[in-house]
Image (cartoon, coloured by chain):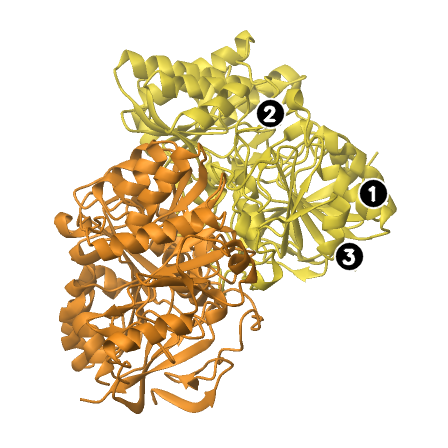
Chain colours: A orange, B yellow
Amino acid sequence: MKKYDKLVKNAAGRIVPTEINGKEVVPYKGLRQHRPNGKKYGPPIPTCIDYPDDGNKTLESLADALKKCGLKDGMTISTHHHLRDGDLVSNQIFDIAHEMGIKDLVWLPSASFPCNDPLIKYLEDGTINRIEGSMNGPLGKFTSAGKMSGLAVLRSHGGRVQAIQDGEVHIDIAVIAAPTADPFGNANAIYGQSACGILGYSLADYMYADKVIVVTDNLIPFPCMPMQIQGNYVDYVVVIDKIGIPEKIVSGTTQVTKSPDRLLLAEWTAKFCEEAGLLKDGCGIQTGAGGTSLAVGLYFEEMLKKTNQKARFGFGGSTQYLVKMLENGVLDYILDAQSFDLEAVKSVRENANHIDLSVFQAYNYHSKGNYTSMTDIVILGATEIDVNFNGNVVTHSDGYLLHGIGGWQNCLHAKCTIIPVPLFRDRIPVIVDDVTTLCGPGELIDVIVTERGIAINPKRTDLIEKMKNSSLPIRTIEELKAEAERICGKAAKPKLSDEIVAVVKWVDGTVLDSIRKVEK
Amino acid sequence: MKKYDKLVKNAAGRIVPTEINGKEVVPYKGLRQHRPNGKKYGPPIPTCIDYPDDGNKTLESLADALKKCGLKDGMTISTHHHLRDGDLVSNQIFDIAHEMGIKDLVWLPSASFPCNDPLIKYLEDGTINRIEGSMNGPLGKFTSAGKMSGLAVLRSHGGRVQAIQDGEVHIDIAVIAAPTADPFGNANAIYGQSACGILGYSLADYMYADKVIVVTDNLIPFPCMPMQIQGNYVDYVVVIDKIGIPEKIVSGTTQVTKSPDRLLLAEWTAKFCEEAGLLKDGCGIQTGAGGTSLAVGLYFEEMLKKTNQKARFGFGGSTQYLVKMLENGVLDYILDAQSFDLEAVKSVRENANHIDLSVFQAYNYHSKGNYTSMTDIVILGATEIDVNFNGNVVTHSDGYLLHGIGGWQNCLHAKCTIIPVPLFRDRIPVIVDDVTTLCGPGELIDVIVTERGIAINPKRTDLIEKMKNSSLPIRTIEELKAEAERICGKAAKPKLSDEIVAVVKWVDGTVLDSIRKVEK
């Protein structure tokens, strides 16, 4: 099977394949241009005849469960990333597959972490054909070096759900690590030694997979409440000693930045929102969990308090800081798809206004609307921005795959997307002529905040008008780029071959860009 | 289109059509014999392109919404019954359709109530071709008289969900009356003047319908929490003055029986469960909301308290009595699909252990297991039981359609099904040679409790053994039948024509029995 075939130039001017891993795909057609046809995927109809009357679906081991699910060459296995770098389950699946001599599996994680680096050996020996999901660190380097047998596919969180729902990706077996479960397969993540708060990223997996395995280290009597995973979709339950390493699950690394430069970015970002009238009573915000974003959140909290206003909702990933906003009454609801620290896990468990939200609701573009376009302000990061406001979030300036897309593409659909970035990193300018990898079309990126000035997308004449008399240093993106280049020189082009190693999908399932092999 | 065609004798010995309303159907094959093939229904893939960015899906009127949904001849319209006899929405749909000159609609309610009797005129004039759902009172008489254009189809609550999921029934437009909603279509039933607690019966409708309309009389700002209905599945939201008549929604008619005969039935039923060791620590029970059932629940509460035991879960429909068990600590959880009174609505709102459960989880037979087979005790009613323990719950001894199946067929799958019934009603014996309509195969009915003795199904040798030395009057079903006939004479056979007016589906979608036209 060829990794890819038949290249064309898509509506964003990027060269992309029209066939990937033996399947036809649609090149990006422009914003709001690709209309899906057909029907949502329908998994096989099960029957109670095949499941135990007493509801006890437990099996001795994960190997048993995988065998009973009919694990075989070429299957697609999905996992979630809620255990983050403490995940002890995902790698076991492939250890077992390797022992069974299975080949050419597709791994569809909702994200990967350094703890998954041992999977490289299975990518090398053919156990795994490819990863469809985020790749960073050694996995990213491996991919960028062109060593993966299949073509890697990068999707946003919403795009992953869209692809599963639409049947673009068919999950043969979903393996769900669950901090607490009952023998029927109902499960949650708010109790147990490996509590990670929420299991939202596995909803699409269990709804659409042919077979579903729940793996837990805390089995309780039926019914396991609350039910973040519904046992009615589950085939087998496996109890193991430990599904995760607690201190790596909720790492406590979500700390507000202390860097004066980053604090300045945060302050200007918050001030921009205030002056432009974006931060207002009843607004919806997503600030994210990075150090700068967290600082923006703190400024928002202060501003809302000062003016006696209240935001209606804050999107998670949730942290102690977002929880504090909820508890301090400047926020009505946290709408959450993942919890980043122990305070957030506790809040999900105890605060009825901290809502476990599905990715379908928040991010899925093939839905009857979603929440991103109703959100007033989102604060995002980027590795590169170009003069047309196009954004890159997956590759570094040297061309290497750095990380996954996460909810980044989805969030771009907010009413105002603001990207606070340093003007340069390690003396490499962030604003470039043309992004190495196109992850988000410039039409959707509204404001770039740097430590040397703020650029508003010329399309947002409304924002430009509002900020006409601002005290903030409003400049053009060309001015910012020129300033960075005066200091650092022009960013060097990465050394890339023609060979494509991965593609970036857009939120509608079309192919937005290709990622090329890095030449040594 | 013929109402039905090609009769055969099914595995239960009943004559049933193999084609209904122009579609092929499968005759009942016996318990656990019919294995579905194929895939779950996949509704059309929507896209955010077609929905407003600001999430405001409100339209001026229900008529507008129905027109925008493309209402046309022959479509299937679904509604839920959570507003019970206070429902002001369902009839409006057909008033509008009638005004538009639409014909041959199929109405798929989750249940019908006397407030829906005005729909008879639309069944007469051809606006509605048929009802697939429960029919009672005048609607039942109308059906039994052979006046419906199409063939009526009766399904259990679980069977309805199974049929929708499997694509046996395709919903063109689901109309969901919602006591509280936001402009995006998120909705719940726990707040607002028409609060009815839970909207569980509309889950399948909105997940699988092509188009979904939410009708509310209490619009609040996004996000409406908790989200019992997810707006991501909703096309339009309509605000009207009043969706229901509060005093008819939660009627307060759920009262414990005061009849000494019925109290005796309840006492013996409870004692049977105690003596047979069915009522035990950690057990799951469903007692139902009828007067006798409620009394059984009170006995259960007393017995559990006395022995310091605790039931793990009680299935709703919930009432103040079940809520009291939860609050008094003899029950860990209420798993609920509908709330029958104000105390129950309040409990759903305030008690985290009163769980809003989907019919998919509780009752769907085409699922990876469901909750019915894990339930230790269910208490059900019946209009007739025959000497083979077959049960009838839809037709009266005169052959008229009396009511729908509700969750009755689903609940039969419990570990022990007990039916307390008077030996005769209006001097007509309840135990007969052969039930007029077969709704539940005798293999699944374990115990019949009457005021003159208790009959255990001979298949349940375990229960017979356990009750060998019981103080309760254990007798054979033939003895009970003979006693009733000594007092009342043999039950007269209803006068039925050969013409079939409705069918009863089994939980697996096969046709269990036919209901025949009543001769005047």
Under circle 3, the secondary element is loop
Residue A458, labelled with which disc? none
- Classify 10 Å Cα crowding around label 2: few (below 14), some (14-19), many (20 and above): many
Residue B64: image x %, image y %?
Answer: 76, 49
- Classify 10 Å Cα crowding around label 1: few (below 14), some (14-19), many (20 and above): many
- Nearer-the-camera pick, A174 or B452: A174
Chain under numbered label 2: B
**Residue mark closest to the camera, 3 vs 2:** 3
Chain under numbered label 1: B
Residue B468 visible in the displayed image: no
Label 2 sits on what residue type?
Val
The reply to the same-chain question for discs 1 and 3 is yes
* Spatial CA span between label 1 and label 3: 15 Å
Residue B72, labelled with which disc? 3
**Residue mark closest to the camera, 1 vs 3:** 3
A7 to the left or right of A231: right
Residue B429: image x %, image y %?
Answer: 62, 22
* Spatial CA span between label 3 and label 2: 45 Å
- Nearer-the-camera pick, B248 or B350: B350
A363 to the left or right of B208: left
Label 1 sits on what residue type?
Tyr
Chain under numbered label 3: B
Mark 1 and mark 3 lie on one chain; the one further toward the N terminus is 3
Residue B430, labelled with which disc? 2
